[in-house]
């Protein structure tokens, strides 16, 4: 397999609005990021993925872009951004930008033009259609609930939006649109960026004629655009014309892909994307996100093992448990009360010793938890409000029931301000932030976690440094043990004549771990553990959320 920097590196995702406020307006910004680069360096990460910082009216916190080549006023200026990328590069950290090109903002000049008249040159940048009488052009629904069509009086037609109505979808079948996208990519690459995280990139190509669709996976119509008819041609075109000319990488966010579909995107011979984010493991504890079901370790293991085995040797995986769309992992699959520290470490061990590039979401490295907001008004996210409305009005669920769902699954759980210290507003800002600080910041914060020898922060630091010392963590093959075990996740990695044995517990119960066959206990070295352990490996009873990693020569 080809060895490259983006396979060996560790990515840290910054959600700028919530990372660090430098100018006391309650909103995180680019100069705030500059202040914290030494922090990132200390943690040891290699690549920053920056969620969108472009001009945007912020209907969806920057995922609705009105100018792809300029920085959002609240976040600073292009000069601030240039200073930031230089400061990152000086410290050997690469920068990956978020590329959101399935849709623009409805305030983007292209859309404003396209709205004006049916024969406007920009009309065909988007999907404008006549209704069927008063009815919508088709029955597709939006990811954020409701119809995917919005009526516009001026020309008496509808436009399509798979997300909020302020996020009209771009028509990728128009070569001019693809040229615009290439220009944007080229522009940022020329300014020195090292890659892109490509937002919902597997839904950019829609079936010709936009036919009515079926209900599937909580959406109507998705069979007509998920891995749509021309998506692979379009990605190859972008790769050939722009990306391939630079030393950069891409990670595609792809909704509902099988490993078979995924390989079409990431097979190294296909020249499309370097890796993707799949969502399979994110649905272990829910159906269509909002129908919460109990977490089952066996289900998780089956999914992750499948991705490990199917992608190995052909493409490359990404390894993540959190991002700005997902609630905090200790609150989901760990124990965010009594065993917060143990379970945060165990979860990190479980995921980051697999094959792939690790992604850490801001705050994950100190074990930040869900926000548990009690009042609807504490939420800010457009999806959260749409879901609340749907639950109350269409499904007739009680306020209490909906609030419970939001406490568990709302995206805002991951969007509360980064907890830097026990100062007022957690050291994020000196004024009331745009979204409330999690009330546990006095306990859970960076200052605290950096000081303590056994903290989650120090554990993450250790994982990152181990990856740099041992090739096997990056490139080794994967093999799962004891698949039926309901409480322990045990796997090995193999490279040349070395073996890595990873043992993680998902329970506070005592569970008997038995050494799998083929492990030579004479040659064992402990690399990492979240409890005191003596060096030799024997069968043992696990302690709550115990995690161990052994190297076997
Ligand atoms: O997310 C795409 C996506 O599939 C999510 O909207 C997902 O359905 C939702 O978060 C589940 O709760 C990307 C971005 O990561 C997200 O922040 C944006 O809102 C969305 O695209 C639109 O750009
Ligand atoms: Ca600010």
Image: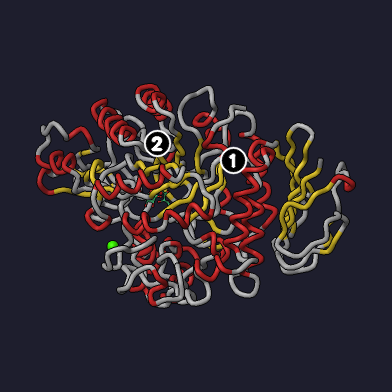
221 or 79: nearer the viewer: 79
Q: Which residue is mark 1?
A: 356
Can I make out residue 12 in this image? yes
- Name which residue lies at 44% across and 72% down: 438
* Mark 2 residue CB less than 8 A from any atom of ligand 1: no
Q: Most extreme residue toward the front, as rendered?
A: 90
Element class at badge 2: helix
Q: Is residue 318 left or right of residue 23?
A: right
Q: Which is closer to the viewer, label 1 or label 2?
A: 1
Separation of marks 1 and 2 at Cα, in angstroms:
30 Å
Q: Residue 61: image x %, image y %?
A: 31, 56
Which of the two labelled residues, at mark 1 and mark 2, occupies the earlier sequence position?
A: 2
* Mark 1 residue CB less than 8 A from any atom of ligand 1: no
> Compared with residue 494, is residue 439 higher up or lower down, i.e. above or below?
below
342 or 462: nearer the viewer: 462
Q: Which residue is mark 2?
A: 224
Quadrant location of the C terminus in the rendered image? top right
Q: Residue 266: image x %, image y %?
A: 52, 31
- Name which residue lies at 40% across and 30% down: 231
- Name which residue lies at 34% across and 43% down: 100
Element class at badge 1: loop
Can I make out residue 401 in this image? no
| Contact flag, marks 1 and 2 (Cβ < 8 Å) | no
Q: Residue 114: image x %, image y %?
A: 15, 39
Q: Residue 417: image x %, image y %?
A: 40, 66
Quadrant holding ligand 2? Answer: bottom left
On residue 369, the disc is none
Q: Quadrant of residue 487?
A: bottom right
Q: Is residue 325 left or right of residue 537?
A: left
State the count of labels.
Answer: 2
């Amino acid at each position: 397999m080809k060895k490259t920097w983006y396979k060996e590196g560790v990515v840290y995702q910054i959600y700028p609005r919530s990372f660090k406020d430098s100018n006391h307006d309650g909103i995180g910004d680019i100069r705030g990021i500059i202040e914290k680069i030494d922090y990132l360096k200390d943690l040891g990460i290699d690549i920053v993925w920056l969620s969108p910082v472009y001009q945007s009216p912020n209907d969806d916190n920057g995922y609705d872009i009105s100018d792809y080549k300029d920085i959002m006023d609240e976040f600073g200026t292009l000069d601030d951004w240039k200073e930031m990328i230089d400061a990152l590069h000086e410290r050997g950290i690469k920068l990956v930008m978020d590329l959101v090109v399935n849709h623009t903002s409805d305030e983007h000049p292209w859309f404003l033009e396209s709205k004006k008249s049916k024969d406007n040159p920009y009309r065909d940048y988007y999907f404008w259609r006549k209704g069927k009488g008063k009815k919508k052009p088709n029955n597709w629904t939006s990811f954020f609930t409701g119809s995917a069509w919005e009526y516009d009086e001026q020309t008496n037609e509808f436009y399509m939006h798979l997300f909020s109505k302020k996020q009209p979808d771009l028509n990728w079948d128009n070569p001019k649109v693809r040229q615009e996208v290439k220009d944007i990519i080229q522009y940022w690459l020329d300014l020195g960026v090292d890659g892109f995280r490509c937002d919902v990139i597997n839904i950019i190509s829609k079936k010709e004629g936009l036919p009515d669709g079926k209900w599937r996976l909580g959406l109507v119509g998705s069979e007509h655009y998920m891995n749509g008819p021309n998506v692979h041609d379009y990605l190859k075109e972008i790769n050939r014309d722009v990306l391939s000319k630079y030393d950069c990488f891409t990670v595609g966010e792809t909704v509902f892909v099988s490993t078979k579909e995924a390989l079409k995107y990431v097979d190294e011979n296909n020249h499309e994307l370097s890796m993707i984010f799949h969502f399979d493991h994110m649905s272990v504890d829910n159906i269509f996100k909002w129908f919460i079901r109990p977490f089952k370790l066996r289900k998780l293991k089956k999914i992750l093992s499948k991705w490990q085995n199917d992608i190995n040797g052909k493409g490359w995986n990404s390894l993540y448990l959190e991002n700005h769309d997902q609630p905090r992992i200790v609150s989901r699959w760990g124990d965010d009360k009594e065993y917060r520290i143990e379970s945060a470490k165990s979860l990190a061990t479980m995921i980051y010793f697999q094959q792939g590039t690790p992604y850490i979401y801001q705050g994950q490295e100190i074990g930040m938890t869900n926000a548990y907001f009690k009042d609807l008004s504490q939420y800010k996210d457009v999806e959260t409000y749409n879901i609340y409305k749907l639950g109350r009005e269409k499904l007739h669920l009680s306020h209490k029931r909906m609030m419970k769902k939001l406490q568990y699954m709302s995206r805002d759980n991951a969007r509360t301000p980064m907890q830097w210290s026990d100062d007022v507003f957690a050291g994020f800002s000196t004024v009331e932030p745009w979204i409330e600080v999690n009330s546990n910041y006095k306990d859970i914060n960076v200052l605290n976690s950096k000081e303590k020898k056994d903290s989650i922060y120090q554990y993450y630091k250790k994982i990152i440094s181990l990856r740099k010392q041992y090739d096997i963590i990056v490139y080794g093959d994967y093999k799962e043990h004891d698949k039926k075990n309901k409480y322990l996740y045990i796997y090995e990695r193999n490279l040349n004549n070395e073996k890595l044995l990873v043992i993680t517990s998902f329970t506070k119960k005592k569970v008997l771990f038995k050494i799998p066959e083929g492990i030579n206990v004479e040659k064992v070295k402990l690399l990492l553990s979240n409890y005191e352990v003596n060096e030799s490996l024997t069968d043992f009873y696990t302690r709550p959320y115990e995690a161990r990693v052994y190297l076997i020569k």
